Amino acid sequence: MIGGMDEIDRFCDSFLDDSHRAFREAARGFAKQAIEPHAYAWEEAELFDRGLYTQAAEAGLLGPSFPEAYGGAGGDVFHLLVSTEALIEAGCTGAAVGLGSLEIALPPIMILGSEAQKQRFVPPVLRGERIAALAISEPGAGSDVAGVRCLARPEGAGYRLNGSKLYVTSGVRADQVTVLARTGLDPHAGLSFFVVEKGWEGFRVSRALKKTGWRASDTAELAFEDVFVPTTHRLGEEGAGFACLMQTFLGERLYLAAQGYALAHAAWREAVAYSKAREAFGRPIAGFQVIRHKLADMAARTLSAKVLTYQCAAQVRAGSCSPAQVALVKNEAARAAEWVCREAVQVLGGMGYMRETKVERFSRDARLLAIGGGTSEIMNEIASKGLGLAP
């Protein structure tokens, strides 16, 4: 089931205005028509139809919080949150993640890019004509970006880029990749962003990665072998990459928190619907206290994660949210997603273990949230520093 207000929605409704509510309903309508009928097939194929990008763009769902001047919907962070909820509820997190890879690939361009670079690299993505990806992690560097070894060496009117990147969402099909590379010796001040385009000599997809969840989204390992990157494709000044990345991480972690409570909420809805329809010992299993209490606990955890994320989003919109706050919220949403999705499988019993059901997919998808965008352990370290606990 997609659509309709429940008590969790109502509790959080005060954060939204009429434009957010209308956008959510439009997104739900799109998801029901364009994603839900294909969710199982796309998960099994481990790829969704590329045409979904243009369909989503036409519906205004690509870059809902990006400025209208660059092809976005001109909304705020809550437009992104409610559209994420709707897309995930359709039962194909991989498709939602693939459509959303621009939410981490385009911010460095918007933050550091010249007007010419913004006009070149942003509107085609928001029109669904090009796919954008962000490449940060490497075989030897993840959350610790000081370990980045992908090297951009000055040469003539540009740079020679050498190295590899790992776990790149949408990396297989990406037409442009926002790449963090080393341009200096300083662990942080020696990092810069570049935009690398598909088809350039020396740039290739090493392999498509097979994942536990998010299966319909393509994920790649990328190789750069003496790739010439013109200076026109460097974003900002040399060494500006680290500070920009910290801003990008803030948005990515909030986006992942949204995925967390959205997965929990969608799984809870599926479990409620099943418990009312499935009969055992002559009555619906919702009639058993153990199931009702389980569903109540699932609702509480979902609501907690959603309210925290909405409150954090409100602070982000006001410009007053710290990295520590976002880290705490991401961890809480990740824990809620894993627990609620697991319990939803339990409510559905054997059917919950079948790949044809949404909750089976949700239970796999939820596991990534404690890893992606910075592990839960890294989030706790960031939070502990923000709370004044670190020595």
Image (cartoon, rainbow, N blue to C red):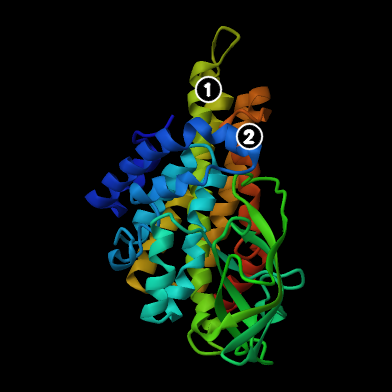
Q: Residue at x 62, y 86 (%)?
A: 159
Left or right: 309 in relation to 340: left
Is residue 67 something that shows in the picture? yes
Left or right: 343 in relation to 296: right
Q: Quadrant of residue 4?
A: top left
- Residue highlighted by disc 1: 275
Which residue type does callout 1 highlight? Ser
210, above or below 166, in the image: above
Whether tag 1 and tag 2 are in contact, CB under 8 A, the answer is: no
User: Which quadrant, please, contains the N terminus?
Assistant: top left
Is residue 302 something that shows in the picture? no
Location of residue 166 in the rendering, given as x and y in whole percent from the top left corner: 70, 64
Q: Nearer the viewer, residue 282 or 366?
A: 366
Numbered disc 2: secondary structure: helix
273, above or below 104, in the image: above
State the separation of the CA atoms marked 1 and 2.
16 Å
- Residue highlighted by disc 2: 360
Single out the mark in the foreground, 1 or 2.
Answer: 2
